[in-house]
Image: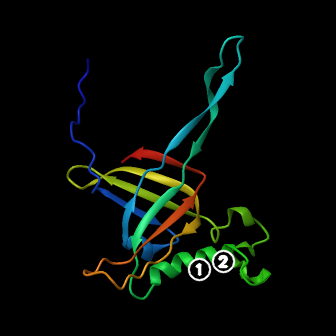
Amino acid sequence: MAQPTNQNFLSPLGGKFEIKRMPTVSFFIQQVSLPTMVLGEIDVPTPFTKIRKPGDQIMYSDLVITFRVDEDLKNFLEMHDWMRSIARVDSFEDSTAWDNEKTPMSDERVYSDGTLTLMNSAMNPNVQVDFKDLYPSTISELPFVTTMSDVDYVECTITFKYTKFEIKKL
């Protein structure tokens, strides 16, 4: 049996996430997880029991990041403004991200790519995970608690939908 050439374990401290559209949020990120991937299945009926066979589609779970909010709310507003530009809040004109008549569904004002870089044991870039066509679907509340005895800085969670992710060794 062949032995692995690299016997170092992956550290949860060795990750860096960047989203092109949100440079301020990227700086304050506290947590990001590589999402779940699920291979669909097909139930094949038989006279006795169903037999499961692998399907032909992959489903990706949401990408969720947590970041610390700066005191000017600059990073929170990056996300807030991106979401509002996609939606119509008060009028049809609110939806500024969809103004391009040529290719609205692939417009960089709606989608952004993101990169998760995983570091090796020497904290050098080792593996890159590229997320394609990210867009925000949920931004969490900002809790303000006046009864705390120590300062626990405000964090916010963002949930993204995306098309796919690809993993490559650097």
- Label 2 and label 1: CA atoms lie apart by 6 Å
Is 161 left or right of 151, judged from the image as shown? right
Extreme front residue here? Answer: 147
Compared across the picture, whether 120 is left or right of 146 comes to left
- Provide the residue designation for mark 1: 81
Q: Residue flagged by tag 2: what amino acid is it? A: Ser
CB atoms of marks 2 and 1 within 8 Å? yes
The N terminus sits in image quarter: top left
Q: Residue 146 sits in which quadrant?
A: bottom left
Q: Residue at x 61, y 23 (%)?
A: 53
Residue 26 position in % (x across, y down): 41, 70
Residue tagged 2? 85
Could you say where residue 46 lies in the image, as x and y percent from the top left? Answer: 70, 13
Q: Establish if 119 lies above or below 112.
A: above
Picture coordinates of residue 110, whole percent (x, y): 64, 68
Residue 115, relative to residue 49: is it above or below?
A: below
In the image, 116 versus 146, the foreground residue is: 146
Per the image, label 2 sits on a secondary structure element best described as helix
Left or right: 35 with respect to 108? Answer: left
Q: Is residue 6 left or right of residue 117?
A: left
Residue at 49% x, 61% y: name it: 114
